[in-house]
Image: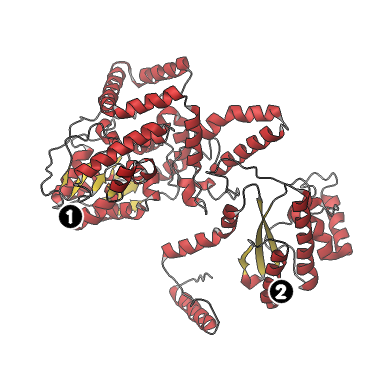
Amino acid sequence: VEFQAADEKDRATLERVAREAVGGLQLLEAARFTHDAAEQSLLWRIRQGLYPSVGAARKRGTTVIIEDVVFPVQSLADATVALIRTAGRHGYDEAILFGHAKDGNLHLTITQSYNTQADADRYARFMDDLVRLVVRQYDGALKGEHGTGRNMAPFVETEWGPEAYAIMQHLKGLADPDGLLNPGVILNPDPKAFLADLKTLPEIEEEVDKCIECGYCESTCPSQDLTLTPRQRIVVRREMTRLRESNADPALATALEADFPYMALDTCAADGLCATACPVGIDVGDLTKRFRRLRHPEWAQEFARHLAERFAWLEPSARLGLRLGHAVQSLLGAGAMVGVTRAIRSVIGQPFPQWSPEMPRPASGRAPATQKSGASAVYFPACISRTMGHLPGEPDSMSLMEALVAVARRAGRPVWIPDDVDGTCCGVPFSSKGYDRAHAVAANRAVARFWEWSEEGRLPIVIDTSPCTYGLNACRPVLTSVNQARFDRLAILDSVAFVHDEILPRLTVRRRYRSVALHPVCSVVKMNLTGKLEAIARWCCDRVTVPESAGCCGFAGDRGFLFPELTGAATEREAAEILSAPHDGYYSSSRTCEIGMTRATGRIYRSYLYLLEQATRE
């Protein structure tokens, strides 16, 4: 139950009356009211997740059906018991009820298979009993807040009677004489229409098989305005499976299979934000990674593994590539470099990183001097921080590593950068592309080194790039048994958490900013660190803006280089919101995401650590 009021006085009155009302009820648990926004949000998510949770628990190959019936409020208690018994009598023991008690409105949710005639017959008997219970026994309504639909259309006459039904048919005929508008959806003379044209959910990959296509995930997807949403990816995958198994439409099956790689795989950021919106936690990125893995031939998997084993060679190579790219751009202009990379892509016929004017300059590759003695934490600069330096036009007087070292030292909580960090990678660049062997090599090496650097877990590991932190905290399944035991004793912290908890309370603000904009990257959202990132910024600024439309920027490590149209589509609304007001600075916690947001807005995004360092500099 949620109470809303125009002011605090009215809200308090509502709460007092509600407490008095529930005080005399025999409840399993005492009623508790909350004013906490986070807890309220969680309660609403639980409520919204009731329907999908039934779908997640369904047997593979069954579908979920939800109905929307209404009983007179005075009969609701008895009718609820009768409805549950009716469902159980027909074998729907998993059925759940939820809805709007004050209106007598109940949503009945069951799972149903249509694979055999016996399944269909059972469902027909249940529907007959359901209609009889609602209409005859309790004088209720077969529909409350939702449309009639194909499932209830054959029973409209039962509820309203022949005379009223004839009027409805006449009105429908006047408005739609040719029967073009939703034929058979509201009025249907076929008493068995609810058993025709049934939608099946064929079994597909286990990562997404429990999806009931509710669509809650769609608003979080960066490709929603470009190609497909998570729900649509699953729907297309099911249709491909159905067509292949039935051989019903070979031409359509061929067309879907041809379009699937780009529409579903190449333009999926695999960022996992869909799982944060899904009531049952489905991460369609897991399906994407599976298919990317299957696309790689054996030699490609082995080549990636060799690269992971020799990662120390890749870092200077990447810095050299950036240096050469900027040299060509200086001589011939940005258009020339863009043309070169597009030409390479055209020749090889495969995705190739596209140059853009926002491409960062190479990092120096040199870490600032630190000491292990007296260190409060081990600072592991992510390989992206060791490779990519400042963006064109960005102040370059201090590197990211220097910024974190400076604020930690200033707070009396110094950090230590080991001398042998080069060649260590979290493995995320490999796992996101489906190179499982390379991911395992990189993750195991990282954990082994963390174990050594941290003195067997005594010191926490702090990482300056949020996606790397998230990836390392999720890498346990690919670790050896020895490294799993080590992993369990390690504290791997994102810099946002470390700075908020350990550094911020020990610093003094010397310079306050008026207004800054933040872009919380996907991993910050998934690690529940958005609040801490905002708190750091608010400590330095009078006004902090996190756009209402903030979401995944679609850069996803390398997607923004390979498929820049994904980043363009993903950031369109957020960029417009950012540009609607001026800010003193623009900040995030991942270099590649900062590139994407810089490209989208024309404003230079950089690490929040620079903001903190400048605000506390003496």
Q: Residues within 10 Å of mark 2 (few under 14, many from 20)?
A: some
- What is the quadrant of residue 245 in the picture? top right
Front tag of 2 and 1: 2
**In the figure, 72 relative to 473: above or below?**
below
Q: Farthest residue toward the front?
A: 481
Q: Position of residue 26 (x, y in %)?
A: 55, 81
* Residue at image point 49% right, 64% down: 43
Residue contact at pointers 2 and 1, CB within 8 angstroms: no
Q: Which residue is mark 2?
A: 72
Does label 2 or label 1 sit earlier along the sequence?
2
Q: Which residue is mark 1?
A: 507
Q: Amino acid at mark 2?
A: Pro
Residue 148 versus residue 199: which sits nearer the camera? 199
Position of 601 with respect to 124 (left or right) is left
- What is the quadrant of residue 250 in the picture? top right
Position of 214 with respect to 246 (left or right) is left
> Label 2 vs label 1: CA separation?
63 Å
